[in-house]
C-alpha cells in the first residue's frame, strides 16, 4: 500500500472537526483537565494511494514538550497510526522538544498496547481524572470499552 503523510492544512480543518465529533463526541478532547479544540491543533493526515484520508494525528507543543492530542487510524493494523506517530515525533524533535507524551483512558487497552510497542513508557495513572474531564465534557461515558468503568487517565511519554 502506498501512503503518504502530510501536515494538516486549512482545507483539512472542517474534516478534522468531523473526525473529532464522530470519534470523540465533540469538536474537542480533554486531557489533564484541558480542552483541546480540533481547529486549533497542529497535525498530520495520512493519505492513501487514491487520495483518501485514512488517518489523522493532532498535537500541541508547549515549551519543550509535545503532546499527542489525538490519533485516529481508520484501518487497524495497517501501519497508519505508526506513520502518524512517527511524523509527530519528528515534528517534536525538529521543534526542540525533549518530551513526547500523551494521555489515554484506562479502558483503551488497544492504545495502551500500541503506545508501549512503539517505545512509549507508562509514567503515570491519574486516578479518577475523568471526574474533572466530565465537568468539561459531560458526554464522556461512565463505562468504556470492554465494559471497563471509565475513570482514569494513563500518561505515556517518550524522551526525545
Image (tube, rainbow, N blue to C red):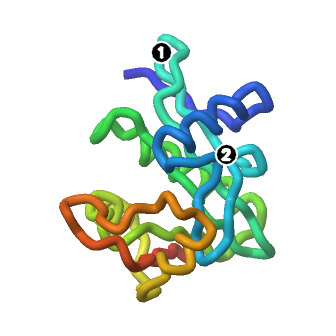
Identified at 76% across, 25% down, the residue is 11
- Looking at the picture, does residue 101 appear above or below residue 50? below
Q: Residues within 10 Å of mark 1 (few under 14, many from 20)?
A: few
Label 2, residues with CA under 10 Å away: few <14, some 14-19, many ≥20? many
Nearer the observer: mark 2 or 1; the answer is 2
Quadrant of the rendered image containing residue 118:
bottom left
Q: In the current view of this chain or complex, which residue is farthest to the left?
A: 146
Identify the element where label 2 is drawn.
strand
Left or right, 151 with reference to 14: left
Instruction: Please identify the quadrant where the N terminus is shown.
Output: top left
Q: How many marks?
A: 2
Q: Any mark on residue 43, and which?
A: 2
Residue 159 against residue 61 in the figure, above or below = below
Q: Which mark is residue 49?
A: 1
The quarter in which the C terminus is drawn is: bottom right
Q: Is residue 91 above or below residue 131?
A: above
Image x and y of residue 82, in percent? 43, 48
68 or 91, which lies in front? 68
Task: Please tell me which residue is depicted at 69% across the width and 37% down the height of the picture.
Answer: 7
Q: CA distance from mark 2 to mark 1?
A: 20 Å
Q: Position of residue 5 (x, y in %)?
A: 58, 34
- Residue 88, image x, y percentages: 61, 53
Picture layout, residue 49 above or below residue 55? above
Query: Would residue 36 be found to the left or right of residue 140 on screen?
Result: right
Amino acid at each position: 500500500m502506498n501512503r503518504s503523510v502530510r501536515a494538516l492544512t486549512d482545507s483539512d480543518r472542517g474534516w478534522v472537526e468531523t473526525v473529532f465529533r464522530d470519534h470523540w463526541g465533540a469538536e474537542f478532547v480533554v486531557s489533564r483537565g484541558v480542552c483541546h479544540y480540533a481547529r486549533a491543533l497542529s497535525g498530520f493526515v495520512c493519505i492513501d494511494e487514491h487520495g483518501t484520508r485514512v488517518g489523522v494525528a493532532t498535537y500541541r507543543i508547549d515549551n519543550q514538550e509535545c503532546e499527542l492530542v489525538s490519533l485516529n487510524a481508520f484501518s487497524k493494523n495497517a501501519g497508519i497510526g505508526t506513520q502518524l506517530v512517527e511524523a509527530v515525533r519528528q515534528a517534536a524533535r525538529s521543534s526542540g522538544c525533549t518530551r513526547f507524551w500523551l494521555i489515554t483512558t484506562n479502558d483503551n487497552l488497544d492504545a495502551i498496547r500500541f503506545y508501549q510497542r512503539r517505545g512509549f513508557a507508562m509514567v503515570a495513572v491519574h486516578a479518577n481524572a475523568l471526574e474533572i474531564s466530565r465537568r468539561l465534557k459531560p458526554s464522556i461515558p461512565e463505562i468504556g470499552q470492554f465494559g471497563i468503568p471509565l475513570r482514569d487517565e494513563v500518561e505515556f511519554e517518550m524522551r526525545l
